[in-house]
């Protein structure tokens, strides 16, 4: 472990040789997202992205009960105008969009409740692993609102319109195995326990063995392609491919393949 940041009251931020670990830490509120936490997450993302050594971000929650149980309802209850509500929605939405478009590969380690804003946070990550005790859901319609941090947009892109509409309109909660069945999570491990973070770290190490510029380019191409048509997506992919042909990492990777040795990538 390279170090731990002491700047944040609502999270624990650690650095482990290229892996940044953000542990949301409001156990008395089941790690619910209030305005202060959203602001601190943005500051932490600035800190992580500023150091090119950091290549993967793992987001999880403290304890065995909750990843993030949702937005802070007591705080949202204070929204008494359309403008206040829109500003509250945009604060979370902008942060989650930053995660979605970051050069970092962002992994959600879902260790318990991932409801409302917590599930929306997981949707903004590049992929999700869950412990078997995880519980998912977008229950906002039961509170008289809708998902406001991107849930109406990202869930449909991930699982399809019909299923997304069913889950949002019913506010239904569901378990980790169902999440796996519908493609919401990549893998479920026994939990609570250490297996989840062990898996996340293992996959992070696999990612960090690859060429940094290539991984970042692949994320850009995939993200942009999902937001346009196939022809535009293929153009984006070809452009990213072409740029990589100018990098030292491309020449190192191909030389290593021919010479049957491990590549030594520098991100150049």
Image (cartoon, rainbow, N blue to C red):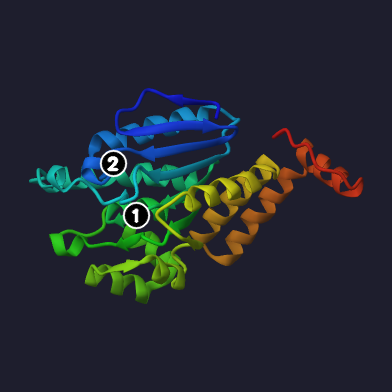
Q: Residue furthest front?
A: 193
**Which mark sits nearer the N-terminus, 1 or 2?**
2
Residue 35 falls left or right of residue 110: left
Q: Residues within 10 Å of mark 2 (few under 14, many from 20)?
A: some
Label 2 sits on a secondary structure element that is helix
| Outermost right residue | 259
What x and y, as percent, mark residue 26? 27, 39
Across and down, in percent, residue 53 comes to: 60, 30
Could you tell me which residue is drawn at 55 percent across and 59 percent down?
Answer: 225
Left/right placement of residue 243 relative to residue 99 reads: right
Whole-Å distance between the Cαs marked 1 and 2?
A: 24 Å
Image depth: mark 1 or mark 2 in front? 1
**Which is nearer the eye, 242 or 38?**
38
Label 1: element kind? loop
**Residue highlighted by disc 1:** 112
Horizontal arrangement in the rendering, residue 198 relative to residue 148 (left or right): right
Q: Position of residue 49 (x, y in %)?
A: 51, 32
Which residue is denoted by mark 2 in the rendering?
91
Q: What is the residue that sits farthest to the bottom in this orientation?
A: 162
Residue at (35% x, 34% y) in the render:
11
Asked where in the image residue 150 lies, by quadrant, the reply is bottom left
């Amino acid at each position: 472990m390279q170090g731990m940041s002491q700047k944040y009251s609502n999270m624990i931020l650690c650095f482990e040789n290229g892996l940044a670990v953000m542990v949301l830490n409001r156990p008395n509120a089941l790690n619910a997202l209030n305005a202060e936490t959203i602001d601190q997450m943005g500051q932490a993302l600035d800190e992580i992205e500023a150091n090119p050594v950091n290549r993967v971000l793992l987001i999880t929650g403290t304890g065995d009960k909750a990843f993030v149980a949702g937005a802070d309802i007591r705080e949202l209850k204070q929204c008494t105008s359309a403008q206040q509500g829109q500003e509250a929605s945009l604060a979370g939405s902008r942060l989650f969009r930053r995660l979605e478009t970051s050069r970092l590969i962002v992994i959600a380690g879902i260790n318990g409740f991932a409801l409302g804003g917590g599930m929306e946070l997981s949707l903004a990550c590049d992929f999700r692993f869950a412990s078997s005790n995880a519980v998912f859901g977008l229950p906002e319609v039961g509170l008289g609102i809708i998902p406001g941090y991107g849930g109406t947009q990202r869930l449909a892109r991930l699982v399809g319109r019909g299923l997304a509409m069913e889950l949002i309109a019913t506010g239904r909660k569901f378990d980790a195995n169902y999440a796996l069945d519908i493609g919401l999570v990549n893998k479920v491990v026994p939990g609570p326990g250490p297996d989840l973070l062990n898996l996340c770290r293992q996959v992070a190490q696999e990612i960090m063995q690859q060429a940094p510029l290539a991984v970042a380019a692949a994320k850009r191409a995939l993200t942009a392609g999902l937001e346009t048509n196939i022809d535009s997506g293929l153009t984006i992919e070809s452009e990213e491919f072409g740029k990589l042909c100018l990098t030292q990492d491309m020449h190192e990777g191909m030389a290593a393949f021919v010479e049957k040795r491990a590549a030594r990538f520098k991100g150049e």
